[in-house]
Image: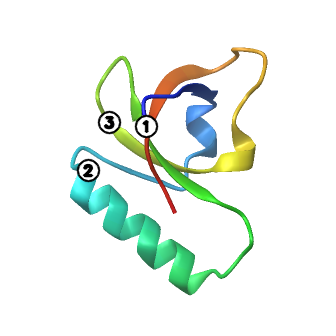
Amino acid sequence: MNEAVFFNPGDAIASSHDFKEARRSAQIIKAERPTGRQIVIAENDKNGVYAIYYADSAKQNHAGEAYHIKDKI
């Protein structure tokens, strides 16, 4: 997945410099807080940090910071 999206960094549920750690955190969040909302792991284009967001918090107007979706849970 190499889809570019924009998120407000303040909306991140969690973040990490390691993809495996970010994925594990996303799985824990999904298990502990069951919801129908999809969770995405996105890499920040500027600093390479992986952030976890709810997919529906993506910005449609290119406001915020650019990320590339790495995984969806």
Q: Residue at x 32, y 36 (%)?
A: 49
Frontmost of labels 3 and 2 is 2
Residue pointed to by mark 2: 19
* Placement of 33 over or under 70, stated as above or below: below
Instruction: Classify mark 3: helix, strand or loop.
Output: loop
Q: Nearer the viewer, residue 62 or 71?
A: 71
Q: Residues within 10 Å of mark 2 (few under 14, many from 20)?
A: some
Question: Looking at the picture, how far across and down is residue 40, in whole percent?
Answer: 53, 51
CA distance separating discs 1 and 2? 14 Å
Residue pointed to by mark 1: 1
Instruction: Classify mark 2: helix, strand or loop.
Output: helix
Q: Are marks 3 and 2 in contact (CB under 8 Å)?
A: no
Question: Looking at the picture, how far across and down is residue 54, in whole percent?
Answer: 64, 53
Numbered label tally: 3
Question: Looking at the picture, how far across and down is residue 56, in whole percent?
Answer: 74, 47
Instruction: Classify mark 1: helix, strand or loop.
Output: loop
Q: Residue at x 55, y 21 (%)?
A: 65
Give the image quarter of residue 50: top left
Q: Quadrant of the N terminus?
A: top left
Give the residue type that dot 1 points to. Answer: Met
Question: Looking at the picture, how far across and down is residue 58, in whole percent?
Answer: 69, 36
Q: Residues within 10 Å of mark 1 (few under 14, many from 20)?
A: few
Dot 1 or dot 2, earlier in sequence: 1
Extreme-front residue of the structure: 1
Give the residue type that dot 2 points to. Answer: Phe
Frontmost of labels 3 and 1 is 1
Frontmost of labels 1 and 2 is 1
Q: Is residue 46 left or right of residue 54?
A: left
Q: Residues within 10 Å of mark 3 (few under 14, many from 20)?
A: some
Extreme-right residue of the structure: 61
Residue pointed to by mark 3: 49
Dot 3 or dot 2, earlier in sequence: 2
